């Protein structure tokens, strides 16, 4: 019930669509048949994982960059889960065979904790590429969390890209929610990237660089780099001497920052308007109440604009009380506010035309 709200946000993303809760997550597998979640505000809080474990190392790396948010570690059961009542009917010669459908263990864990507030998640190495395929299906439908996966093989990145780009396409109300990076060494740049990116939102992920775990991967060949580019993935690459991400794309047609900025904007409006509703102890369904909601939406718009989330100031439109369908008034349902604004864009590449005369 962590996601209950009386304010329903209907997102319509036009092709060029407060509080930034700084919370990231790490997905890993566990040793028992239960899903678990642990939230840390510093490396000193970590007691469930030993200092020589990969998860401990990843949490430590997140806080190494002076990240002030929290890191949630989501631990999946040790096997897939078959809930009672999750039935599937398969037609056969006798009619139909009814069987329980199992849920991928990592998806099951995410189902329990996906509304905890984290916006970005990365994987420990025990989450396989095949597991991530199922995870990305879940996250695509959820549209709340972005997966920044880390692989040690280009082939795994390509496999997930081929899967995601075909099945999780960008539409008018959905964005692709996954990308991946290749790191062939033991470094953990992905967890630092998502922590830094969220703490400094809005930011173009291609312009994140020089973090402690970011070192150009000298085991990647020029062919590997081209394959990563073609698969919309990324890696650490030296640009004018800076250790930078190669690119900031998702596996679809949108960019990482477009998804993150959109979710921050949406949840900020929703949180603020819910607060306004909470303050109405005996509100009337009239133009005065509608005006208060519009004022709150305009205040949020100005705040988000000043923080850099929009290319231009949002326009807030309202439907007057007299034009509201009486049946909606009876149901105490107002859906007459429309907020229109372009999410901020960035410059990743450019052409420079240099004319020299000798």
Image (spheres, rainbow, N blue to C red):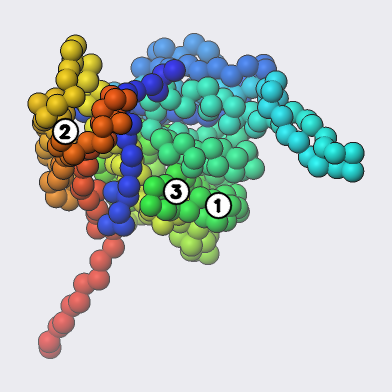
User: Which of label 3 and label 2 is nearer to you?
Assistant: 2
Front-most of 101 and 126?
Answer: 101
In the picture, measured across the screen, residue 118 lies left or right of residue 101, that is left
> Which of the two labelled residues, at mark 2 and mark 1, occupies the earlier sequence position?
1
Query: Residue at 70% of width from left, 20% of height from top?
Result: 84
Q: Which residue is mark 3?
A: 176
The part of the image, by quadrant, that contains residue 301 is: top left
Tell me the element at label 3: loop
Residue that appears at 48% across and 62% down: 230
Report x, y in % for residue 163: 58, 52
Which of the two discs, 3 and 1, labels the residue nearer the N terminus? Answer: 1
Q: Residue furthest bottom?
A: 358
What whole-number distance in Å separates the C-alpha atoms at marks 2 and 1? 42 Å
Residue at x-position 18% and y-position 12%: 282
The quadrant of the rendering that contains the C terminus is: bottom left
Q: CA distance from mark 3 to mark 2?
A: 38 Å
- For the view shown, which residue lies furthest in the front direction? 326
The front one of 196 and 315 is 315
Farthest right residue in view = 94
What residue does disc 1 label? 167
């Amino acid at each position: 019930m962590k996601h209950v709200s009386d304010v329903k946000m209907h997102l319509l993303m036009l092709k060029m669509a407060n509080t930034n809760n700084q919370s990231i997550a790490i997905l890993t597998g566990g040793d028992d048949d239960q899903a678990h979640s642990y939230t840390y505000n510093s490396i000193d809080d970590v007691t469930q994982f030993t200092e020589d474990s990969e998860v401990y190392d990843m949490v430590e790396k997140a806080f190494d960059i002076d990240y002030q948010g929290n890191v949630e570690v989501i631990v999946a059961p040790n096997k897939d889960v078959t809930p009672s009542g999750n039935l599937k009917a398969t037609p056969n010669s006798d009619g139909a065979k009814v069987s329980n459908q199992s849920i991928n263990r990592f998806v099951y864990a995410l189902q329990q904790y996906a509304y905890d507030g984290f916006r970005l998640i990365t994987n420990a190495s025990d989450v396989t590429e095949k597991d991530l395929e199922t995870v990305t299906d879940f996250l695509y439908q959820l549209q709340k969390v972005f997966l920044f996966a880390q692989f040690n093989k280009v082939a795994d990145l390509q496999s997930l890209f081929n899967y995601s780009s075909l099945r999780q396409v960008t539409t008018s109300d959905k964005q692709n929610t996954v990308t991946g990076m290749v790191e062939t060494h033991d470094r953990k740049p992905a967890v630092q990237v998502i922590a830094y990116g969220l703490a400094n939102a809005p930011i173009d992920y291609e312009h994140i660089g020089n973090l402690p775990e970011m070192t150009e991967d000298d085991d990647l060949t020029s062919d590997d780099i081209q394959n990563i580019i073609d698969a919309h993935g990324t890696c650490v690459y030296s640009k004018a001497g800076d250790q930078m991400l190669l690119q900031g794309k998702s596996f679809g047609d949108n960019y990482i920052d477009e998804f993150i900025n959109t979710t921050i904007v949406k949840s900020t409006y929703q949180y603020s308007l819910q607060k306004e509703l909470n303050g109405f102890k005996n509100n009337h369904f009239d133009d005065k109440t509608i005006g208060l909601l519009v004022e709150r939406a305009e205040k949020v718009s100005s705040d988000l604009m000043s923080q850099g989330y929009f290319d231009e100031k949002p326009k807030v439109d309202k439907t007057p009380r007299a034009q509201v369908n009486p049946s909606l008034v009876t149901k105490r349902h107002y859906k007459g506010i429309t907020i229109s604004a372009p999410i901020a864009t960035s410059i990743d590449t450019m052409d420079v035309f240099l004319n020299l005369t000798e």
